[in-house]
Image (spheres, rainbow, N blue to C red):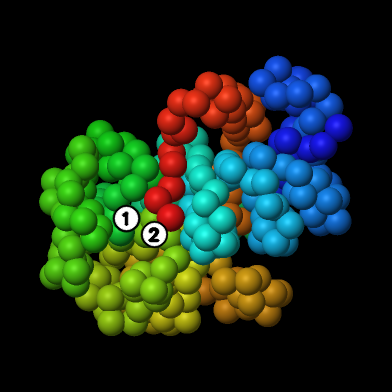
Amino acid sequence: MPCRLLMMYSTHQPSALHIQEAERYLDSDSVVVATSEEQAIEAAKSAEVIFGHRYLRQVMPYADKLKWVQSTAGGVDRLPLEELKANGVTLTRSTLGSQTIARHTHTLMWSLVRGLHHTFQNQVNRQYDTNIRILPEPKQALILGTGSIGVALANILQKDNISVSGVNRSGTQPAGFQHIYTGQDWHAALPQTDVLIMALPTNLNSSLCVDEYVLSLLPPHAIVINVGRAETLDTDALCFALSNHQLGAAALDVTPQDYRVQDSVLWTTPNLLITPHNAAHSAERADHLEQFFIQQLARFTNGQDLLDSVAL
């Protein structure tokens, strides 16, 4: 039986029940779960639908019958967008993790404000020290990126009585934001910003958009958090600013690959909290992804519009 649906998740292996539910909308035995690049390439030759993007770039030259790709991620800037567009393939993304990422970001912010990273280190060192550096409670937050993550975060921060401004290219003002900046206008807000949060994709306009100059405009108690893409932040400039007490603290859920080695400056930079790109992860993530994709597959087979479609 030729493959009609190719599953190649990067975060988990699909459950048996998930495969059975998918086959309800397709032919029996037409679902292939790829666990290697070679298997994915072979299955892609007859696949109409791909769930996941683990080997997507590798299989595209062979996927002549492909109609639709459902990504497991919210950001799609690293996918072969030009190839998908040229082949007339529909691309949809998943924004299921937006609330989880927003909660993760919120947790990072208050952990830094309350000095929990210092408290934990004292615990590791078996030191009971009450002299913990606590930062001023944030009153003004600036979020770079007002997509699903930015909106979810703005709504959470509002409940903390934090005034939230955002930066985007369209100038539209989503719910939860008191003000929206476009272009370089947001630089004027930096001196009054207590928390600068980055939730940006990677593109030519955002590459290294937070650099030494931007960081220099922030007040010395400010917190910087990046849960978007590592390429949108000058990591060296951030580490320098923290080491020279020009910032209050920072948290990174995304880091450049070459900064993850044991002798990286990240491990010795003070007041820097690092999480291993797991802001979107939760114990329920696999179940939520599978449920969402089955809903999408039902829409696809019934000729309905797909959710979270990406304009190519």
- Which residue type carries mark 1? Gly
Distance from label 1 to label 2 (Cα)? 5 Å
Give the quarter of the image for residue 297. Answer: top right
Give the quarter of the image for residue 161. Answer: top left
Question: In this view of the protein, which residue sits in the foreground, 183 or 60?
Answer: 60
Q: Residue at x 44, y 66 (%)?
A: 202
What is the x, y in percent for residue 103?
Answer: 43, 39
Q: Are marks 1 and 2 in contact (CB under 8 Å)?
A: yes
What is the x, y in percent for residue 68?
Answer: 58, 42
- In this orientation, does residue 272 appear? no
Other-residue count near label 2 (Cα within 10 Å), few / some / many at <14 / 14–19 / ≥20? many
Q: Residue at x 70, y 17 (%)?
A: 24
Horizontal side of 115 relative to 257 (left or right) equals left
Residue underneath mark 1? 145
Residue underneath mark 2? 200
Of pointers 1 and 2, the one earlier in the residue sequence: 1
Question: In this view of the protein, which residue sits in the foreground, 198 or 8?
Answer: 8
Q: Secondary structure at mark 2?
A: loop
